[in-house]
Amino acid sequence: MKVYKFGNAALKDSKALALAVETVREESPEIIVVSAMGSTALDLGRAASAAQDRKEYLDILEGIRAFHKKVAEETLGSQAYAPAMEEMDKILPELRDLLHGVQLLKDLSTRTLDQILSFGERLSALLFSFAMNSRGIPALVADSRDFICTDAHFGQARCLEGDSKSLIRAAFQDMGAKKVVVTGFLGATKEGYTTTLGQGGREFVACMLGASLDAEEVQIWTDAAGMLTADSALVPDAFPIEEISYEEALEMTHFGARVLSPASLHPVMMAGIPVRIRDCRNPSSRGTRIVARARPSDFPVRGLASIPAVALLSIHGLGLPGVTGIAGRMFGALAAAKINVILITQASSELS
């Protein structure tokens, strides 16, 4: 079994969707995890903010519908187009009602925002499955909220992996011959409230499915040629790393390589399942394979990572020694400003 995940860049328009579906036809993965298409996620956030401020949001909502309608027109055959639009128009009134409620209350909680953002993946999965079926590839949609169980930290929910693994195995035990298109990014609390998994959540859903179902491989399709030896914006002749270990990949992602988030690798790393990063613009390329033990590189260094926006904050003075709570005050101020601290050092004299 293989699990493929197509990100936003791989589903940016009708041409990209058609290429993704053709890739599925040729390579035949059993499970396909999808992100929201085009700018839909950003547009949903804009609509939610506009509704909260009691500004016009219906134009944004109509733009979302028009974009998906255009993709359906250009991707689906004449027989599939009408049923797809009918299903889409069953989903969108729920979104309109949510936005209307936000406008009336002038309140946008993180729980409500998660519900609003969920429509991006739901619409994407709907069109992807219709595009597959219209090309003779039997497919059905599975809502990840039915089997990705999370805590109630809305906007940045944490997956309860033990509960989710049991739910995933039960949900996919009778897949049959049909392929399954799964909404990425989404989960639900035990009480049934929709959550989003934050940065890397779409990749995490694919990796969680792969780990739970003992997949042969999880493939992440994006607009990068793989994990590169360096940032191509700084090093023009950087090239894809053919194979890299989980630990090396985690170090690279932590220190600036943005192909994957470290959290998304956790389930497959624990299960020992390979992950491959592939370029949606060039399906013939093999990309980067992430494994438990990578083959030795032809080079002394596997790759270089860099974080361009880093500030060094130094606090020093004669008033610091023996005064309790200085570190707490400093890190509390940084946390309040949502600043991530990657390195801490303190002199033994407490002077700095």
Image: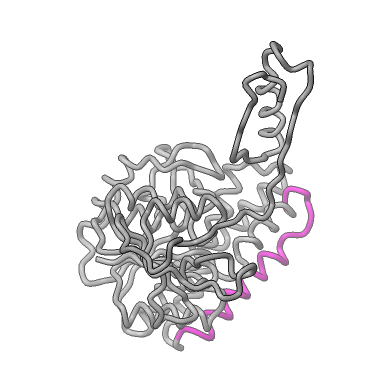
Which residue is rendered at x = 56% and y = 48% of the image?
Answer: 114
* Observer-nearest of 204 and 149: 204
**Where is 8 relative to 194, above or below?**
below
**Where is 348 relative to 180, above or below?**
above
Q: How many labels does the image show?
A: 0
Measured from the top left, where is residue 284 in percent x and y?
39, 83
Q: In which quarter of the image is the C terminus?
A: top right
**Where is 262 relative to 191, above or below?**
below
Examine the structure image and report whether residue 29 is included in the region drawn in magenta. no
Q: What range is drawn magenta here?
A: 51-76
Q: Quadrant of residue 209?
A: bottom left
* Observer-nearest of 263 and 309: 309
* Observer-nearest of 3 and 318: 318
**Where is 50 relative to 80, above or below?**
above
Measured from the top left, where is residue 164 in percent x and y?
33, 45
Residue 64 visible in the current orientation: no
Q: Main secondary structure of the magenta part?
A: helix
Q: Residue furthest front?
A: 300
Q: Quadrant of the N terminus?
A: bottom left
Measured from the top left, where is residue 42 in percent x and y?
65, 61
Q: In which quarter of the image is residue 283?
A: bottom left
Examine the structure image and report whether residue 61 is included in the region drawn in magenta. yes
Which residue is rendered at x = 74% and y = 33% of the image?
Answer: 314
Residue 263 visible in the current orientation: yes
Q: In this view, does 306 lie to the left or right of 319?
A: left
Measured from the top left, where is residue 214 in percent x and y?
23, 56
Q: In this view, does 83 lie to the left or right of 315?
A: left
Q: Which residue lies furthest to the bottom in this view?
A: 78
